Image (cartoon, rainbow, N blue to C red):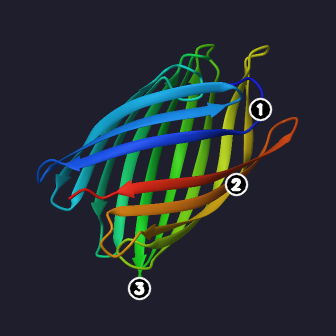
Amino acid sequence: AFNSPQRGGGYAVWMMYRNRISKKWELAARFDTIHRYGITDRSIGGGALLHMNKSVLRFEMAKSGRGGLLPDTTYELEYVTPLTKTLVGYIGARRTEYSADGATNLLTYLAAEYYIAGNNMIFARISRSHSTYSTGASNTQPTAVVHFTHYINDFDKVSVFVGNASESVLRNYDNVVNTARGITYGASYRHRLGAQSPWLIEIGIEQSHVKYPSRKVTDRAVRLSLTRLIK
């Protein structure tokens, strides 16, 4: 949403609620707020999950306050199904719209998670990101990410990930789309606070290195998540 790379610290907070209301249906609601570059933006959304035997169909949508940091509108559809006893497949699409620069992005992806002996799991996703602007300019980028997770028990886990990062930046003066490319990686640890506790805590660190036409930008983030299990 910006015509040049930005710098500065900030924070992001999100809250999510999920409730399995029946054998087939699960409802979800989410609230996000983010502050960066002296701007604060908020988003509220929700969706539903349809459980069909072992497969799941998920639909979510969200609307923001149009601060420019979050998409004005987001729509996402995903289908998840087991392929073998140890392999699960994903296919999905996400459409986002930004009024600030008349941009629309369509992200389509294929993913799979493979379970390895010893409580280990590898998740890999390949995506195609296509952005179009009201001026007629457009840009298409492939992205990929790989996660490795070791489950200590049913609740505790350690994860690491690495992927490529990209960002499309529209130059208004000549209507050319510049693409910033780089790498992003991180790690996280989730722990249940007591054998019978309903609370889970997760802490993660993330870092990205992105090269713009005129500079290199490094972003670092620390993520803290609290989850409460409701019976």
Q: Position of residue 22 (x, y in %)?
A: 11, 50
Q: Earlier in the sequence, mark 2 or mark 1?
A: 1
Judge whether 105 appears above or below 90 on screen: above
Q: Earlier in the sequence, mark 3 or mark 2?
A: 3
| Quadrant, the N terminus | top right
Residue at image mark 1: 5
Numbered badge on residue 117: 3
Numbered badge on residue 207: 2
Tell whether 111 sits left or right of 104: left
| Quadrant, the C terminus | bottom left
Q: At 30% from the left edge and 67% from the top edge, which residue is drawn? A: 83
Q: Say if residue 78 shows up in the picture.
A: yes
Q: CA distance from mark 2 to mark 1?
A: 16 Å
Residue 41 sits in quarter = top right
Residue 131 sits in quarter = top right
Q: Position of residue 158 (x, y in %)?
A: 52, 72
Type of amino acid at the residue the image marks with label 1: Pro
Residue 120 sits in quarter = bottom left
Tell whether 186 sits left or right of 117: right
